[in-house]
Amino acid sequence: MEPITLEPQNFENIRSCGTVRRYQPGELIFSEGDPADHVYFIEDGTVSVFLHEFTNRVEIGQRATGSFLGEMAVISQGKRTASVSAMTDTTLVVLDKEQFHRLMATDNKVNDIISHVMAQRTEELALKENLLATTGIKGNNLQISIKGDPTMRETVFDRERRESPMDKVLPDLTQKLQTLLIERCVSEVSLHFNSGEIRLTSIFDPFNYEVHPANKLIDTNYLDRHFPVLDFAEKTRLIRRLYDTLATEFDTLALPGHYKESYRHRYRNWQPLTQEEIARVIDKLQTLRTIQNFYLRNMGISITRDAIRMQFNCDGTHIVSTGDYDQFLADNIGI
């Protein structure tokens, strides 16, 4: 679908209402979280619209001649939901709130174009934010770092290191974790080395998690009592069926269209982690716990999304895709 844009003749009235500003390539026009004081009409040039997902800059679109920016936050009286910078030499016509509302009230043709584009943008932004937040679609080269308490990093070499209850059983536990994710009903595992607890989610109760001590999970009889054997292909079939069931219910729910489409998109494109990917990630656990200075404290892995969550003893959280897992460890930890 071709984007709807303003024509050169529309800018005659827009110019009479506002102020012309010029930007050079790379120059920031406004930032995510800024107060929404103005609307920007692109008379000439191209700009980049982007979000900051933790430490990553993620471009969510580009706007070119005949487009406009910032109108949604001005109308909703909110803050900027994204940042914008010039990609080329760019000429903008800038209107403050009062000037923008006057334009909308007096120019029906411009009003119709802006109203139509705003409806489209609301759906597009919600869809893209949702995909960034939930992950799970393979091939995104996901690498996110969330900074934690800086004092943790400052004191990392001063803190005494102690063997945890989980470390004592880790060689046997890694094999059992693979068994749980590949051969039994478990869909998600979260390891907490300091406390020795392991949180697991079963495909049969996907909205809750169970807590089990690590030293119990190395016992096959214990696994038999709590986690029935389930073929991996059958487990993924049940997940797909659950997604299909949820998707069919959307027609009965009074939800905005962009919510329905974002979830349907995720359901249609969902792929589980492969058995090989699961084994490769779990195999590194003992190595990650025995690094001399920076060692693993918490880790989460789920077959339903391509995002491995790791916390080390220094600070913060790291979330990487399975495809980038080995490279992340090589670049940051030397494994």
Image (cartoon, rainbow, N blue to C red):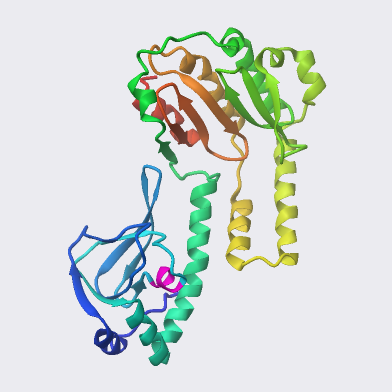
Q: Which residues are magenta?
A: 71-75
Q: Percent position (x, y) of residue 325?
A: 45, 30
Q: Is residue 63 magenta?
A: no
Residue situated in front as seen by the camera: 78 or 146: 78
Q: Is residue 73 magenta?
A: yes
Q: Is residue 179 visible?
A: yes
Q: Is residue 330 visible?
A: no
Drawn side of residue 218 relative to residue 44, left or right: right
The image shows residue 217, relative to residue 29, as above or below, that is above
Drawn side of residue 309 relative to residue 264, left or right: left
Drawn side of residue 288 relative to residue 330, left or right: right
Identify which residue is drawn at 51% across, 48% down. Answer: 133
Q: Percent position (x, y) of residue 129?
A: 49, 55
Q: Percent position (x, y) of residue 266?
A: 59, 52
Identify which residue is drawn at 45% across, 85% down. Answer: 112
Residue situated in front as seen by the camera: 322 or 318: 318
Residue situated in front as seen by the camera: 15 or 140: 15
Magenta span dominant secondary structure: helix
The image shows residue 307, relative to residue 267, as above or below, that is above
Res. 206 image quadrant? top right
Res. 107 image quadrant? bottom left
